[in-house]
Amino acid sequence: MFWKIVGIVALVWIALAVVGALVKGLFWVLVVGAVVFGLYLLFKAMSDSDTKDVTRL
């Protein structure tokens, strides 16, 4: 019974370590993606603003 509990605790510990590393890595990918997308939207909003077709809403 003791070894089952130790095994479960070890598996949970390893799973949390893997999930934590993934979240840490993917957080920065999300931040960089959001910044790039925001810059793209800003560029699209500021470029060709006077030549947009008003009827094409």
Image (cartoon, rainbow, N blue to C red):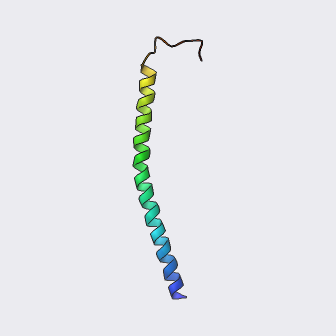
Vertical comparison of 53 with 11: above or below? above
* x then y, percent, for residue 48: 44, 15
The residue positioned 43% from the left and 26% from the top of the image is 42
Residue 40, quarter of the rendered image = top left
Image quadrant occupied by the N terminus: bottom right
Residue 21, quarter of the rendered image = bottom left
Residue 18, quarter of the rendered image = bottom left
The residue positioned 52% from the left and 77% from the top of the image is 8
Vertical comparison of 56 with 18: above or below? above
Residue that extends furthest to the bottom in the rendered view of this protein? 1
* x then y, percent, for residue 20: 44, 61
* x then y, percent, for residue 34: 44, 39
Q: Residue 29 vs residue 56: left or right?
A: left
Vertical comparison of 8 with 45: above or below? below
The residue positioned 50% from the left and 86% from the top of the image is 3
How many labels sit on residues? 0
* x then y, percent, for residue 31: 41, 43
Image quadrant occupied by the C terminus: top right
The residue positioned 47% from the left and 76% from the top of the image is 10
